[in-house]
Amino acid sequence: MAPPMRFFSLLLAIPASADILFATSYNDHTVTSLRLEGSTLSVVGKNLDCGSEPTWLTLDKTKSRLYCLNEGWGGNASLTSYQTRADGKLTTLDILPVLKSPVSSTLWGANNERLAVAHYDTSTFSSYDVSNAKDLRLTKSETYTLAAPGPVPDRQEAPHLHDAILDPTRKFLVSPDLGADLLRLYRITGNSWTAITPAKAVPGSGPRHGGFAVHGPNTYFYTVNELSNTITGYKVTYSGSSISFAQILNFSTHGPGGSVPAGTSSAELEISPDQRFVLISSRNEASLTIPAFDGSATTIPSDPIISFAINPASGQLTLTQIAPAGGLNPRGFSLNKAGTLVASALQNDNRVVVYKRDVKTGKLGAVVASATVGEGANNGPNYVLFNDC
Ligand SMILES: *[C@@H]1O[C@H](CO)[C@@H](O)[C@H](O)[C@H]1NC(C)=O
Ligand SMILES: *[C@@H]1O[C@H](CO)[C@@H](O)[C@H](O)[C@H]1NC(C)=O
């Protein structure tokens, strides 16, 4: 029996945890907890237990757990598990040394008891038992080699796994390999995985991050390709225990026929929660000009976040908007669960910015709030996540 409406109103009266965000930053070596209240984004905590180069966060909202990857540039790499608290602060549960250069992770397996991790420099896909967050354990890893460098030899001298993504059926994991121009694929059985034949990406494109979009019977997969600054789209089909990817589109991050300045390096890709839009971020363009955040009358350069609308029947993309990311080097950004806010981490500006987003049009709007995150020149905040998905 459904509870009476009064019960729902009581639930809604509890302060929304959507107001808490977490950001990783290289230069101050912290995970910063932020609270968004109206137009104020304030720092409510800084945690140093993610090690020297915090780079990526994965949230298990149901269990109030947060997992942080430390790339370990000069020292040891690590995986840290945290308990999240209502006030935004983090309680450290465990710190596990891991193979160098973990850059992205995703939860998978029964009850999200496993974490898959992509390792960039060390060309490895690994996974951890996180069923007891106070006792993290490596369960399995596979390291890859390249027989010969790819079409972009200085970046494709070795396999470079850059993302770990669980498919919507929870039966496969995908890891875009920037060095080998592959989508590495893993079949899940219970809490274990087996590598299966990878799908080919566009040669020399350097697939970096990706995401699935599901429209009724149609499943699509999109990658943002760092080396060619393009987006590739695939139609995904399942048959028995296999998954296959058929390319349906491939064009500039600025849309068909678009171009980017030399030195551009696309970074993040997110699918809107309603599956209707693909959003990507692009670094080192400085192609837009926005008002400064210090209240002065000056302007500052910004890189873009670019939105595309997905055609549900075909998977084709239409350019919707090229919006400011809020400054330079938006390595990571994310949407809240409702899709009404976009938080962007500006690595060169020591800033996190929250933008309004119109769910219907898919367009980013006004700045809601911003905060200083990171200390020192460059290599500041690189990823930011809402505590609600
Ligand atoms: C890395 O880990 C090893 C073994 O735990 C330790 O001896 C060493 O001090 C660590 N190095 C750094 C830079 O933290
Ligand atoms: C993919 O798109 C890019 C940008 O338009 C183009 O340079 C490249 O040749 C395309 N490759 C394939 C295999 O379609």
Image (cartoon, rainbow, N blue to C red):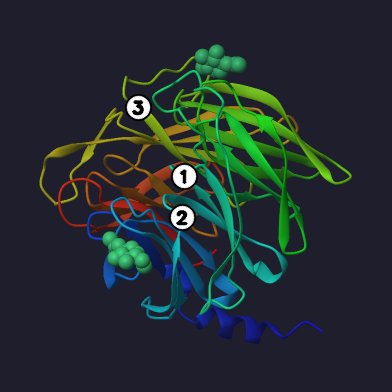
Residue to which mark 3 is pinned? 264
- Give the percent coordinates (x, y) of residue 335: 48, 53
The answer to which of marks 1 and 3 sits earlier in the sequence is 1
Quadrant where the C terminus is found in the figure: bottom right
- Give the percent coordinates (x, y) of residue 4: 71, 85
Residue 230 seen by the camera: yes
Residue to which mark 1 is pinned? 122
Label 3: how many Cα within 10 Å (few below 14, some 14–19, many 20+): some
- Give the percent coordinates (x, y) of residue 255: 50, 23
Res 155 → quadrant:
top left
Q: Residue at x 57, y 41 (%)?
A: 210
Identity, as a three-letter code, of the amino acid under mark 2: Leu
Q: Secondary structure at mark 3?
A: loop
Residue 39 seen by the camera: no
Q: Secondary structure at mark 2?
A: loop
Labels 1 and 2 touching (C-beta < 8 A): yes
Residue to which mark 2 is pinned? 99
Identity, as a three-letter code, of the amino acid under mark 3: Thr
How many numbered circles are shown?
A: 3
